């Protein structure tokens, strides 16, 4: 079993959701933390909660799309703790729109956070991780880095990119002290859908939130437990939630037809018929 006592972990997107849950679980195991997010109110409250557990906690406002800012954050973290042992690239956003209608500005915004944030974090922290006796890089992709959904092209692209980047990195780190993991959560009860940018007229944000809340069965705390167990079991790919495991199997069994089997195209076809009949 991995011993966390005295280790130092960096977690992005830590003010809420999976990032917050991971931070709390690590603190309970004796791990010191460097937490980053754009929302300082949530981080300040979390810092107090974590320090009450007897570990040190450094917090910073960070836009992960800013490479120089990430490098500075990593330097500050190392200056404070003199070591970094774990990196959780967790920060992410969601965009719901069609390829035909979404703006390139919105697409770039999402990719800069979801994909480039992972690249920036890895490049900024990896030099410090290589000095740790046993280090971990944990990149959060998604179920939608394993299969695609309509109106999620940008999000799908970012999470597939995270998956490809992480799997290549894992191979490059083979035989080293740095273990690399790619996490694919299914429906997790977090705020990412509530705060999603919705530009399409095909569906309302309230509909999206209602549908997501019906399907999201896994709590952030459960997700954190699964992720930490996956790290301890040296899993390259960590699937979080029964829906992620089921849909991963279906997409692998039926790679050319899963969208029909799962009914992903049906809603799009029905919507097109409605528009044609108006």
Image (cartoon, helix red, strand yellow):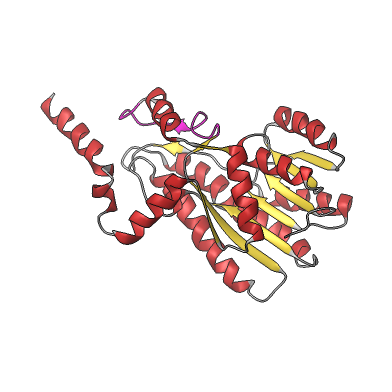
Q: Magenta region: which residues?
A: 190-203
- 18 with respect to 134 (left or right): left
- Quadrant assignment, res 181: bottom right
* Farthest residue, direction left: 277
Identify which residue is drawn at 72% across, 27% down. Answer: 41
Residue 231 lies, in percent from the top left, at 64, 58
Residue 37 lies, in percent from the top left, at 68, 38
Answer whether residue 1 is magenta in the image: no
**Image quadrant for the N terminus?**
bottom right
Give the number of callouts.
0
Identify which residue is drawn at 60% across, 56% down. Answer: 230
Identify which residue is drawn at 75% across, 51% down. Answer: 9
Instruction: Evaluate whether residue 199 shows in this view.
Output: yes
* Farthest residue, direction bottom: 175
**Image quadrant for the C terminus?**
top left
Residue 159 lies, in percent from the top left, at 48, 51
The foreground one among 17 and 96 is 17
Instruction: Evaluate whether residue 90 shows in this view.
Output: no
Identify which residue is drawn at 43% across, 27% down. Answer: 209
Question: As displayed, is residue 121 above or below residue 267?
Answer: below
Answer whether residue 192 is magenta in the image: yes
- 238 with respect to 273 (left or right): right
The foreground one among 108 and 277 is 277
Residue 19 lies, in percent from the top left, at 65, 41
- 91 with respect to 82 (left or right): left
Question: What is the chief secondary structure element of the magenta stretch?
Answer: loop
């Amino acid at each position: 079993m991995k011993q966390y006592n005295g280790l130092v972990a960096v977690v992005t997107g830590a003010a809420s959701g999976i990032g917050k849950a991971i931070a709390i679980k690590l603190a309970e195991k004796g791990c010191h933390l460097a937490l980053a997010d754009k929302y300082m109110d949530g981080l300040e409250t979390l810092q107090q909660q974590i320090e009450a557990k007897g570990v040190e906690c450094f917090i910073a406002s960070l836009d992960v799309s800013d490479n120089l800012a990430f490098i500075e954050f990593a330097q500050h973290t190392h200056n404070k703790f003199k070591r970094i042992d774990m990196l959780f690239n967790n920060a992410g956003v969601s965009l719901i729109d069609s390829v035909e209608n979404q703006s390139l500005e919105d697409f770039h915004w999402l990719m800069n956070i979801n994909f480039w944030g992972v690249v920036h974090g890895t490049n900024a922290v990896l030099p410090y991780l290589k000095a740790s006796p046993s280090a971990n890089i944990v990149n959060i992709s998604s179920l939608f880095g394993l299969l695609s959904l309509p109106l999620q092209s940008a999000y799908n692209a970012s999470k597939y990119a995270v998956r490809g980047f992480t799997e290549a990195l894992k191979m490059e780190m083979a035989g080293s002290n740095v273990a690399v993991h790619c996490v694919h959560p299914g429906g997790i009860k977090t705020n990412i859908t509530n705060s999603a940018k919705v530009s399409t007229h095909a569906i309302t944000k309230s509909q999206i939130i209602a549908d997501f809340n019906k399907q999201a069965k896994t709590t952030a705390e459960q997700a954190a437990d699964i992720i930490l167990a996956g790290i301890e079991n040296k899993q390259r790919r960590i699937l979080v939630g029964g829906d992620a495991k089921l849909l991963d199997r279906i997409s692998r069994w039926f790679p050319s037809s899963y969208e029909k089997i799962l009914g992903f195209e049906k809603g799009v076809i029905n919507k097109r018929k409605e528009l044609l009949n108006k």
